[in-house]
Image (spheres, rainbow, N blue to C red):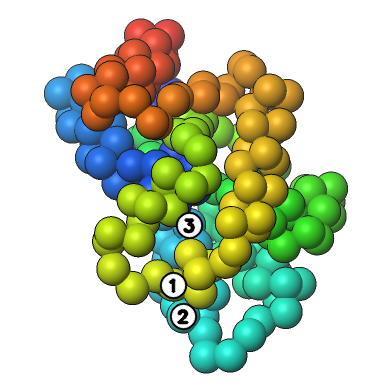
């Protein structure tokens, strides 16, 4: 019997929207459903990716926006080749904290390099893998940053100005509107149980459709 290809779920959103909490809820839901999965993150997921993550988030001094984009793309290329694609091919599901939408939002819009620039670079590098489901946790920027501030010391991207995150948020919402077949926007400003319920419903729909 041929192996059924796994499903690829990505979790997106700005700082403070509750990605960690909801990632844990999704992991528990997949476990209850008896689905074999791997959890990962971007940048990261591989040895090279984790090294690049450290440079992107904690580099001493400033990085050129183009350098940041190239590093994020390099991490993603390795991530797909070494972890994501092999897992999907083996029938495992993949749950990833951020993916290509994040680069479109953060480097494309936030850094003002242009979303098309980001997408064209990925096309040039052969990145064509699209998630089966993207959950975009969305809330007003100021509210998310307030939550983030309570967590402790911010990294170099978290220290960006409000305008940076406003641009990134709008890019996220624009991409979601253009891809309703895969992106579900979740109002992350509501009560935790309400947010978790909306996330669980979207994931359950994917589980049901895969059986």
Q: Residue at x 39, y 11 (%)?
A: 205
Q: Secondary structure at mark 3?
A: loop
Name the N-terminal-most of marks 3 and 2: 3
**Label 1 crowding class (10 Å Cα cut-off): few <14, some 14-19, many 20+?**
few
Q: Residue at x 54, y 52 (%)?
A: 80
Residue 54 locus on image (x, y percent): 45, 77
Label 3 belongs to which residue? Answer: 42
Residue 196 locus on image (x, y percent): 28, 25
Foreground disc of the pair 3, 1: 1
- The reply to whether residue 100 is visible in this rendering is no
Q: Residue at x 35, y 61 (%)?
A: 149
Label 1 belongs to which residue? Answer: 155
Horizontal side of 196 relative to 131 (left or right) equals: left
Q: Residue at x 51, y 24 (%)?
A: 185
Circles 1 and 2 in contact, beta carbons < 8 Å: yes
Name the N-terminal-most of marks 1 and 2: 2
Label 2 belongs to which residue? Answer: 58
**Label 3 crowding class (10 Å Cα cut-off): few <14, some 14-19, many 20+?**
many
Foreground disc of the pair 3, 2: 2
Task: Decide which of 83, 130 is in the foreground and name it.
Answer: 130
The CA distance from mark 3 to mark 1 is 15 Å
Horizontal side of 64 relative to 42 (left or right) equals: right
The picture quadrant where one finds residue 23 is: top left
Foreground disc of the pair 1, 2: 1
């Amino acid at each position: 019997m041929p192996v059924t290809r796994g499903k690829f779920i990505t979790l997106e959103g700005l700082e403070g929207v509750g990605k960690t909490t909801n990632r844990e809820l999704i992991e528990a839901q997949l476990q209850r459903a008896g689905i074999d999965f791997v959890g990962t993150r971007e940048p990261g997921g591989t040895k090279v990716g984790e090294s690049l993550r450290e440079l992107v988030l904690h580099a001493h001094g400033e990085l050129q926006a183009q350098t940041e984009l190239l590093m994020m793309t390099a991490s993603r290329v390795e991530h797909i080749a070494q972890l994501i694609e092999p897992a999907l091919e083996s029938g495992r599901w993949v749950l990833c904290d951020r993916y290509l939408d994040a680069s479109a939002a953060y480097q494309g819009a936030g850094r003002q390099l242009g979303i098309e620039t980001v997408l064209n670079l990925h096309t040039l590098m052969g990145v064509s893998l699209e998630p089966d489901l993207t959950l975009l946790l969305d809330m007003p920027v100021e509210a998310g940053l307030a939550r983030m501030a309570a967590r402790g010391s911010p990294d170099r991207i978290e220290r960006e100005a409000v305008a940076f995150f406003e641009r990134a948020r709008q890019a996220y919402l624009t991409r979601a509107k253009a891809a309703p077949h895969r992106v579900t926007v979740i109002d992350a400003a509501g009560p935790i149980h309400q947010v978790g319920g909306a996330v669980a419903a979207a994931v359950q729909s994917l589980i049901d459709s895969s059986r």
